């Protein structure tokens, strides 16, 4: 009996060991703002070597689409990281409208959280769905190490989820790595060391100029043909190649200090990089500086791969690189096709709606505001006067339908059952939802754009490399599939 039990236990341990040995010890997920498949194809001849060159030759490659409206904000990052839609994960755009304060509030704002090295108060508490990191923690246990490094606070926290050991992002004002008090480790020691080392200052003090003669670029603007381009990294830090270089250096510093990918417990490292240059008006390459961003990105990813091969071995890690739509087509591109872009101001629409309701019901503040594709009614006033909210919602929807540029408008209870239902998180939505016609841009406060992606259904490139992987899903993916692929 004892021998049988011993044999059974040994068999189980060997099975667990065999399963563990087939899993890479480190998974790296890289989300690249503005990266498109067309740009990767166009830039490939420039890369004799480098990370993107390697992945274009050896990685599984496909594209993915989003099953909801894409506004160019962090709703896309949230979908990639949660594997679900805004109606479920609760992130509709970069800001939501606060009825109590009557103004837009940054997503993930959390008064309970303190910034470390920053005044920004953010946390992942408002992410309603489990993220990649949360499920990684549940599957791999407390010994797994999980870190996220990025360029924008919201994107970094969305990547870190609820369960990361820590995260850090590069602050555009202080040029330091900063974080939120939400995570147990606070600011990683490696980030603090880089802050103190002077390395960031050294890179930001340099100028960014073309790495090739300007005539060798395919897309120099008229101005670039005459003068090239020159930027002070310090002034445009998050939109220069230096930003990507610092993220990669921080990733390698964390890998070394935390020994990521060394033991048998699989670790997870998530990175945000960018292809957006200071003047880019489109995700498509339209300038030499955008081409230069891709060349720098290729070099930085190549350095990451080279160092990981040397430190832990190519069989011990896997890497997924994912594009993220931010700007879509430029207005100039559409105008070349005689498709002029027009603008719709949500604040002005809200003000006109308020005037319309005053004419019907009297001089009161019937509208709290407009933000994104929503009009927010003054529900407290409507309730106080014992009026029918649904009747007023229907009147406002009909009124908006007469606005130039509005394709359709719904009372919110109809919108959440319409074709746009995936895009709407009910608790942050307004009372009336509207969708604009093609080639109309949505403006909000002080003319700041809300809907900056001028592309109805943008696709993103997905590249997945692993020495151990032999198959990959065929055909175009849904963005909600990415989480499952990472976890498997």
Image (tube, rainbow, N blue to C red):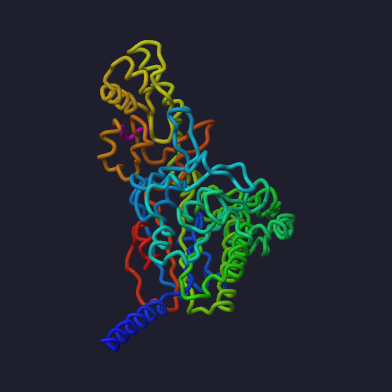
Please give the range of residues in magenta: 405-410
Tell me the residue at 35%/41% (across/down). 425
Q: Is residue 13 above or below residue 92?
A: below
- Quadrant location of the C terminus in the rendered image: bottom left
78 vs 259, nearest the viewer: 259
Q: Position of residue 199 (x, y in %)?
A: 71, 60
260 vs 2, nearest the viewer: 2
**Residue 49 appears anywhere in the view:** no
Query: In the image, is 433 to the left or to the right of 188?
Result: left
Tell me the residue at 31%/34% (across/down). 408
Queried whether the magenta region covers residue 286, the answer comes back as no
Which residue extends farthest top?
362
- Quadrant location of the N terminus in the rendered image: bottom left
**Residue 237 appears anywhere in the view:** yes
104 vs 287, nearest the viewer: 104
The answer to which quarter of the image holds residue 251 is bottom right
The answer to which quarter of the image holds residue 477 is bottom left
Tell me the residue at 51%/45% (across/down). 332
């Amino acid at each position: 009996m004892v021998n049988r039990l011993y044999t059974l236990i040994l068999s189980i341990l060997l099975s667990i060991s065999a399963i563990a040995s087939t899993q890479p010890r480190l998974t790296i997920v890289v989300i690249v703002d503005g990266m498109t498949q067309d740009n990767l194809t166009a830039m490939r001849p420039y890369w004799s070597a480098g990370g993107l060159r390697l992945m274009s030759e050896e990685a599984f490659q496909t594209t993915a689409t989003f099953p909801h409206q894409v506004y160019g904000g962090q709703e896309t990052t949230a979908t990639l990281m949660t594997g679900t839609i805004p109606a479920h994960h609760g992130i509709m755009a970069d800001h939501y409208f606060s009825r109590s304060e009557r103004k837009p509030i940054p997503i993930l704002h959390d008064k309970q959280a303190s910034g470390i090295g920053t005044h920004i108060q953010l946390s992942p508490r408002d992410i309603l769905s489990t993220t990649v990191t949360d499920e990684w923690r549940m599957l791999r246990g407390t010994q797994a190490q999980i870190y996220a490094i990025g360029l924008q606070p919201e994107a970094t926290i969305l990547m870190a989820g609820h369960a990361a050991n820590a995260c850090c992002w590069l602050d555009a004002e202080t040029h330091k790595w900063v974080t939120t008090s939400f995570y147990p480790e606070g600011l990683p020691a490696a980030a603090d060391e880089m802050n103190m080392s002077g390395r960031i200052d050294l890179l930001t003090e340099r100028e960014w100029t073309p790495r090739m003669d300007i005539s060798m670029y395919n897309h120099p603007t008229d101005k670039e043909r005459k003068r090239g381009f020159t930027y002070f990294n310090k002034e445009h830090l998050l939109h220069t190649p230096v930003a990507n270089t610092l993220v990669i250096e921080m990733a390698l510093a964390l890998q070394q200090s935390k020994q990521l990918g060394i033991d048998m417990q699989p670790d997870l490292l998530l990175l945000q990089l960018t292809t957006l240059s200071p003047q880019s008006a489109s995700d498509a390459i339209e300038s030499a500086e955008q081409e230069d961003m891709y060349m720098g990105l290729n070099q930085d990813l190549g350095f990451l791969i080279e160092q990981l091969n040397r430190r832990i071995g190519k069989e011990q890690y896997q890497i997924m690189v994912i594009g993220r739509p931010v700007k879509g087509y430029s207005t100039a591109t559409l105008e070349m096709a005689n498709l002029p872009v027009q603008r719709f101001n949500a604040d002005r629409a809200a003000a006109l709606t308020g005037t319309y309701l005053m004419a019907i019901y009297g001089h009161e503040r019937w509208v709290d505001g407009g933000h994104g594709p929503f009009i927010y009614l003054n529900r407290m006033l409507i309730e106080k006067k014992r009026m029918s909210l649904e009747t007023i919602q229907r009147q406002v929807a009909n009124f908006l339908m007469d606005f130039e540029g509005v394709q359709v408008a719904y009372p919110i209870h109809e919108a959440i059952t319409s074709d746009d239902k995936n895009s709407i998180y009910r608790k942050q939505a307004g009372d009336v939802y509207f969708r604009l016609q093609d080639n109309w841009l949505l403006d909000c406060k002080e003319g700041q754009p809300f809907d900056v992606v001028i592309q109805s259904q943008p696709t993103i490139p997905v590249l997945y490399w692993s020495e151990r992987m032999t198959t990959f899903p065929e055909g175009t993916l849904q963005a909600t599939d990415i989480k499952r692929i990472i976890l498997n």
